[in-house]
Image (spheres, coloured by chain):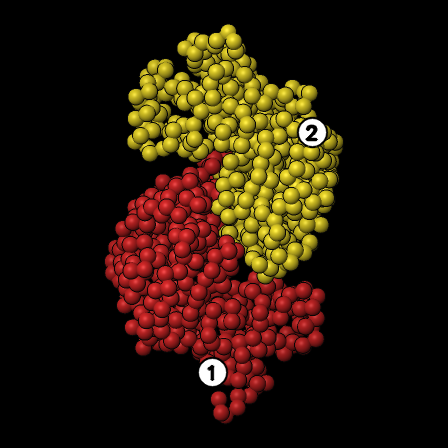
Chain colours: A red, B yellow
Amino acid sequence: MNKIPISDELINDLIKKSGLPGPGSASIREITHLVNLIEKATGMNFVRMEMGVPGLPAPEIGIEAEIDALKKGVASLYPDISGIPSLKKETSRFIKLFLNLDIRQEGCIPTVGSMMGGMVSFLVANRNDRTKEGTLFIDPGFPVQKQQVRMLGHDYHSFDVYNYRGKKLRAKLESYLKTGKISSLLYSNPNNPSWICLNEDELSIIGELCRKYGVIVIEDLAYFGMDFRKDYSVPGQPPYQPSVGHYTDDYILLISSSKIFSYAGQRIGIMAISDHLFNRSYPDLRRYYSSDKFGYSVIFGALYGLSAGVTHSAQYGMAALLKAVNDGTYRYRDDVKEYGEKAAAMKKMFIANGFKIVYDKDLDNPLADGFYFTISYPGMTGKELLAKLLHYGISAISLDITGSDREGLRACVSMVQKKQFTDLDKRLKKFNEDHPIANNN
Amino acid sequence: MNKIPISDELINDLIKKSGLPGPGSASIREITHLVNLIEKATGMNFVRMEMGVPGLPAPEIGIEAEIDALKKGVASLYPDISGIPSLKKETSRFIKLFLNLDIRQEGCIPTVGSMMGGMVSFLVANRNDRTKEGTLFIDPGFPVQKQQVRMLGHDYHSFDVYNYRGKKLRAKLESYLKTGKISSLLYSNPNNPSWICLNEDELSIIGELCRKYGVIVIEDLAYFGMDFRKDYSVPGQPPYQPSVGHYTDDYILLISSSKIFSYAGQRIGIMAISDHLFNRSYPDLRRYYSSDKFGYSVIFGALYGLSAGVTHSAQYGMAALLKAVNDGTYRYRDDVKEYGEKAAAMKKMFIANGFKIVYDKDLDNPLADGFYFTISYPGMTGKELLAKLLHYGISAISLDITGSDREGLRACVSMVQKKQFTDLDKRLKKFNEDHPIANNN
């Protein structure tokens, strides 16, 4: 039990048996699968940092609303594909109260998680102009969104934003957009995995250039309000979660319930389409849809065709959660800020044991503490580090699969229990002893 | 109130205002939207036959299991994309007990309704061979499945099976398959909208030819066990729901919860992939997915990318329903056979008032009474009939949009209440008086 390091034999044997690729190139789900096997074989509890899953229970408000809806008989009735009225209303309110943006209810549409929100966005935004080719990703980012684009047979481009922060972003961005081949641009803010946060100057550059080149912006707000350096959680009060919506006309917001509401299991997110984009006509959409209108193609084209709407009871759950947050009766930040506290403590331990933070600055400010942070170890590639840490009961994912230019790992704090901190510290110490850092590092 | 016929002015005005196309070419959802407007404007309750939605409450067994799962905290936890173990187990059992087929649990995968099951099937099955082009639909059929193929940029072919029943099916089918361009073949059994049921001879022809030409069969069982001429509902006892699975190796079953369990609201269905297909390698899949294995591409490619799995609580609901049916403690047929009884009564009224049943024979047998039937009126096209019936407080959809060669309408019985039968009869009589049938008909 708990013999550290775990032997190569045992791990390589499990990799061979499971038919998984080596840890370096493994996807998030594949790492999870491998770690499950190692835990089973060793009886050891890993410090699991590979999956971005909520580590908190779902708020009662949502659960109760779902149970109530089920008792009222929603299970037998097809939900309106465009969303139940209360959810559309509370989403529009939420966007006004926390982003200070105006999006009409018609454009506030539930999706089967933001995963589907991304898919629907690509299915429509990347077909609006036959002369364009696909999506530009501001990386590092969530690998599955590139998988979605690839699955649809679209092209994509991407660049690591870390060296193009602030004013430098303009030239870099324009070098892609001026080709005229970009249909849509996607980034997450706060950024998964680096946790850097694009600021108003950068968002205004993105908005201005996307307007100039007719590019639809897809703003992934999976970690809404989780830049804990600010409090974006007071309804109708500044500061507001920054958004590109203040700087361009044609944009889509992806609002996930998984992290701010710890609601990942019910698979519901919101795709909010700006009024201008919702009502905009793109004749080339008729190649795939019965209408040239963007909003109509999203609802009666893509969403209808993917799943005919979102689980009825889950829509009531999400509507109740948004209403509580809008009314100020539930403050989601009080629950999730624990992630930031854990991140601060864990980063300290890694640094104390010879690790470096890969993305360590947010422009000139220290990086926020949040859901993710990134680590490297002198003299090791990300793949090597991931493979070695597995022997010490620590799992994460390699930055290679996130479009990062840098060597290292993404660490997610959510599944790590505070009572595991002593284990983590011990394991990191042992790792550091076993892998002395040459002075030239 | 209830002035019949409703004036042209009123209806045309609503069509203009709503921006909907004329009734003839309107989709199912568009007809529903128009009828809602007419009901609102007239205060009249329509006899609504346009949408194939369950008319029964969802069984308590499913609701209770969902509520229990929510109370246990599943809402915060990402469901396994390939499905929770109990659902996979009960699905595999269900397929053995009611289809007499063996499909391993690994291939029994929940989808966000059979709608997504179709989408996933096309996303993988139609990409397995770069020299092929798409899907062959045995029509008439569900229009949205063709919309899905179109949305993915694939091709499709289709033919109306009514004139190619029995032995005639072979030559017709082979004329398409021998081109070598067909990736997958889809049909629903019982058939939506005609309610004809392919028999074992026909299924064996389909299976044999699809095996010969390397075509993946997608068998849509949305109306599982609803050919009420037989009782397919006794677990482990013949007769079994007929299936192509007895006649070919590479097939997918789409099992919907919407009709047999009246569970349409929770958006959960099952995609069951035959063992042979699940484990089959298609090198061309690597163009879109990280693996050449069919099953792996379905789960970690298409399903992961579309929604990252199915609502967690709904999986528990569906698992409980399947278990109850497998154990013989819940007999779904006792609930849904009411549809057949309504169909028999409603058909009589239509026939008594000059209507004809469009698809009136099932080979040499009288057609079964089920969820749908098809009607026409002498001297009128389907579009004309649909437009005129709206004036009499009766709604349906035109067969034009189902790939049918014939003129007429699809009528769904589920939303029609028995207490509306007298209204229906009155309205049909009035319609018949106002539209005398020429003797030559």
Q: Amino acid at mark 2?
A: Lys
- Per the model, the C-alpha gap separating discs 2 and 1 is 78 Å
- Mark 2 element type: helix
The residue identified by callout 2 is: B168
Q: Quadrant of the N terminus of chain A?
A: bottom right
- Between residue A101 and residue B206, name the one nearer to us: B206
Badge 1 density bin: few <14, some 14–19, many ≥20, Cα 10 Å: some
Is residue B5 placed above or below A17 in the rendered structure?
Answer: above
Badge 2 density bin: few <14, some 14–19, many ≥20, Cα 10 Å: few
Percent x, y of residue B225: 64, 31
Q: Badges 2 and 1: C-beta atoms under 8 Å apart?
A: no
The residue identified by callout 1 is: A352
- Mark 1 element type: helix
Q: Residue A434: tell me if it is visible.
A: yes
**Which chain does tag 2 point to?**
B
- Horizontally, residue A307 falls left or right of residue A100, namely right
At horizontal 26% and vertical 55% (from top left) the residue drawn is A100
- Between residue B64 and residue A370, name the one nearer to us: A370
